[in-house]
Amino acid sequence: MSAASASSTTTPEAPRPAKVRVRLACGVYEGLLVFGVAAVASLLYGLVVRPPGDVSWGWTYQVFVLAVTAGYFAWFWSRGETLAMSTWHLRLRMASSPATVTPTRALLRFAISLLAFMPGLLTLHLAGLDTARGAWTLVMSANILGYALLARLQPSRQFPHDLLTVTEVVFV
């Protein structure tokens, strides 16, 4: 076997971790998709669950939409990617392994990733700015950028929820 043919049969390159800015851009697209999922869930809740004439949606509605959103992510992450991740050529897998995550691990990842929003939400609440749109946008944007900075400080460039669940987002 010649050296030229031996070099053409090399093993494929291992997937490399996705860049933080690509994951943030994917997250914006994901937000649009989840908005649509939440809209359909809201429609179903309004038609099926909410009593006619009841003007308050209540905490059961919030829990329902949260459960639908968790189900959306658990379903797609346990298959390796959401539609937004597929568009950006990203894949979720176990850290340093080609294995996809289990549905249980995907739900855990979802729950831990929600904690990323807590500092901003707590800041808004303590400052009494829960309903101030301008302040909400500014504080939550700073919160997300701060969370992204945490990923930039990691050698693997993974977000804290990935480190805690031993998962990683890679380019495919």
Image (cartoon, rainbow, N blue to C red):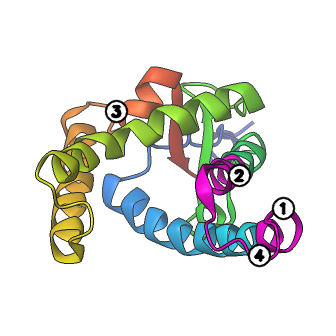
Q: Position of residue 78 (x, y in %)?
A: 75, 39
| Vertical arrangement, residue 104 with respect to residue 28, above or below | above
First to last magenta residue range: 44-69
Q: Quadrant of the N terminus?
A: top right
Give the secondary structure at mark 1: helix
Callout in the foreground (2, 3): 2
Disc 2 marks which residue?
64
For image coordinates 46% across by 62% down, the residue present is 27
Mark 4 and mark 1 lie on one chain; the one further toward the N terminus is: 4
Q: Are the residues tagged 1 and 2 within 8 Å (C-beta)?
A: yes
Answer left or right for 143 relative to 74: left
| Vertical arrangement, residue 24 with respect to residue 53, above or below | above
Q: Position of residue 23 (x, y in %)?
A: 42, 57
Task: Look at the image and say whether residue 47 sits in the magenta stretch.
Answer: yes
Q: Residues within 10 Å of mark 3 (few under 14, many from 20)?
A: some
Q: Are the residues tagged 2 and 3 within 8 Å (C-beta)?
A: no
Which label belongs to residue 49? 1
Name which residue type carries label 4: Leu
